[in-house]
Image (cartoon, rainbow, N blue to C red):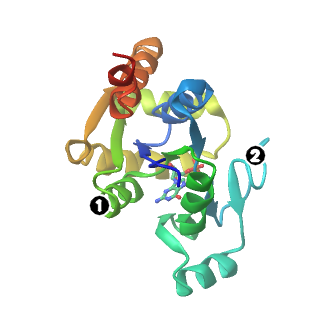
Amino acid sequence: MSDFKGKLFVFSAPSGSGKTTIVRHLLEQERFNLAFSISATSREPRGFEKDGKDYYFISLKEFKNKIKNDEFLEWEEVYRDNFYGTLKSEIERIWALKKHVIFDIDVVGGLRIKKKYPKETLSVFVKPPSVDELKIRLKKRKTESEEKINMRIAKASVELATAPQFDKIIKNYVLEDALKEAEDLVSDFLELNKNKE
Ligand code: 5GP
């Protein structure tokens, strides 16, 4: 029998805080043995996003069916009619590969996962310098309409208030520092340094 025990790393933050950059960076670090939890969503693919890589893009109807069948570990209507959720089968898929799971999800979902797997999960909140800076970053990204950007900004203020409920907070003011800090947190939680001693 394998003694592999999978861990869960939740990175949550308001949209535009840079958490996706941090998560991608961590995924590149082979020593962490991480795999990305691909969420299901009812929103349309953006830009170069691929089904089964960035998200499992499914219809609203299919999403609601999966809710009914209790297939989600957690799910959320993040924006109106835009549902996002973590399928239970996704965690099983990754743990079967003997990898740890890393999540890029909203704060409510992140806290739910922590609650369901308190010991196995490290929950991290990525804090942007300010709400104004978030707006600038979202505008630069040019992937959403003004209306959608405003929707995301309105949600950001509510999300920022949940930061103290997370195990750790990373201030993403200078990206290099945030990346290093994220690496240290993952390394400590996996006890990688301890195993070397
Ligand atoms: P986006 O549309 O920018 O890809 O994502 C919008 C928000 O939904 C982000 O805050 C993202 O982290 C969150 N999100 C993505 N996947 C999930 C998920 O599986 N569950 C929950 N609760 N939120 C998610």
Residue drawn at (48%, 42%) of the image: 15
Q: Which residue is mark 2?
A: 49
Q: Is residue 109 visible?
A: yes
Residue drawn at (34%, 34%) of the image: 189
Helix, strand or loop at label 2? It is loop
Which class describes the residues within 10 Å of circle 2: few (<14), some (14-19), or many (20+)? few
Residue 84 in the figure: left or right of residue 107: right
User: If the image is split into quadrants, where does the C terminus sit?
Assistant: top left
- x and y, in percent, of residue 8 in the image: 43, 47
Say what amino acid the circle numbered 1 marks: Lys
Which is nearer the eye, 153 or 179? Answer: 179
Which class describes the residues within 10 Å of circle 1: few (<14), some (14-19), or many (20+)? few
Relative to 172, is 122 above or below? Answer: below
Q: Is residue 172 visible?
A: no
- x and y, in percent, of residue 186 in the image: 40, 30
Question: Residue furthest toward the left?
Answer: 164
Location of residue 183 (image quadrant): top left
Residue drawn at (68%, 40%) of the image: 143
Q: Which residue is mark 1?
A: 115
